[in-house]
Image (cartoon, rainbow, N blue to C red):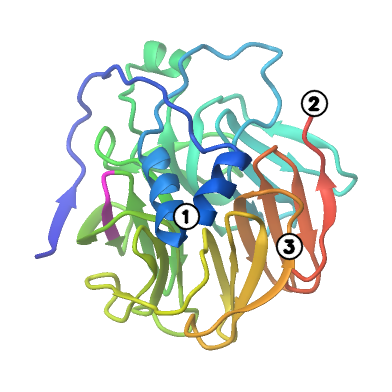
Amino acid sequence: MSRTTTAPRSPGPRARARRPRRPPAAALAVALALGAVAVVAAVALLRRAAGPPTSEPSAGAAGVVHIHGLGINPRDGLLHIATHTGLFRLGANGAIERVGTSYQDLMGFTVLGPDRFLASGHPDLRQMRQQNLPPLLGLLESTDGGRTWQTLSLLGQADFHALRTAHGRIYGWNSSGAFMVSGDGKTWETRSTLSLADFAVNPLDPDDIVATTQGGVQRSADGGRTWQRIPGSPALLLLAWARPEALLAVAPNGTVYVSADAGATWQARGALPRPPAALLAAGDTLYAATEDGSVYASPDGGATWQLRYRAAG
């Protein structure tokens, strides 16, 4: 049965142990050999175990670490990169710069419109101590291009590892396992509970949702209330669905797939050079971040890739 949740007053900070966010590439390769269920289950478990940073930021900690999400700001057309240590912007010349002064861990990053972003995640220790923030930031909103953030709801309750906006709704997967939907970002309906790695919403149908889960690729035809496994799907990790005729996906080993029938069948299209960390479809361009912190762009739906930003080190 679904339930409606409103945001209570924030409880005090809670101590949480930090665990590794994602398995290394070698571990993913072994898991892939064991099957799709093992792969997605491992990633979902590690995502759920993620916690706030365990050390305060320093002047030298300005690099891109653990990319969680990508988005294009319509105001300037620039790619924004949400990471474990804050938000970055990739310039047209390939230079990267930090947006704002926060080092908070940004999960579930998505763009609503010009300079208007949504995210979730965890504060850095500086914020926790100075602002008395809990480890879970709930749903965050920025209206100034990511320079500052305010909590809209569920402070201390929710840690959305995946967020999507479509059809005037906000869809979110909480690390607790709850799949939730909101019309205003303040009041939420929990529609089901499942372990997933990523999900995407059909651009033509607000109730048609495809997810990569512990049980393989699954579909919901009722807005996330019930789910059915799609038989015969490859092992998939990340999804992007900007056009009805092209549901795009990346496997844990970097292979890119496309489905022209909303996930019923898949065709391999190309491959990333490394295991993926984030995926974005924006217009005619597909963007992907890899586990080493690099960012790539594809003008042909994932068939070929060009390096846009090389990770340091």
Mark 1 or mark 3: which comes first in sequence? Answer: 1
- Measured in 3D between alpha carbons, the distance from the residue under mark 1 to the one under mark 2, in whole angstroms, is 31 Å
Q: Are marks 1 and 3 in contact (CB under 8 Å)?
A: no
- Tell me, yes or no, if residue 16 can be seen here: yes
Residue 253 drawn at (x, y percent):
63, 55
Residue 313 tag number: 2
- Is 30 positioned to the left or the right of 94 in the image? left
Q: Residues within 10 Å of mark 1 (few under 14, many from 20)?
A: few
- Measured in 3D between alpha carbons, the distance from the residue under mark 3 to the one under mark 2, in whole angstroms, is 23 Å
Query: Image quadrant for the N terminus?
Result: bottom left
Q: Which residues are magenta?
A: 176-180
Query: From the viewer's perspective, is the residue at label 3 or at label 2 nearer?
Result: 3
Q: Nearer the viewer, residue 144 or 187?
A: 187
Residue 209 included in the magenta stretch of the image: no
Q: Secondary structure at mark 2?
A: loop
Q: Main secondary structure of the magenta part?
A: strand
Which residue type carries mark 1?
Leu
Residue 292 drawn at (x, y percent):
70, 37
Residue drawn where x is 42% and y is 72% of the image: 210
Residue 179 included in the magenta stretch of the image: yes
Residue 304 drawn at (x, y percent):
82, 66
Which residue type carries mark 3?
Ala
Q: Nearer the viewer, residue 271 or 75?
A: 271
Is 301 rendered above or below residue 80? below
Q: Secondary structure at mark 1?
A: helix
Residue 211 tag number: none
Residue 34 tag number: 1
Mark 1 or mark 2: which comes first in sequence? Answer: 1
Query: Image quadrant for the C terminus?
Result: top right
Q: Which residue is under mark 3?
A: 271
Q: Nearer the viewer, residue 284 or 176?
A: 176
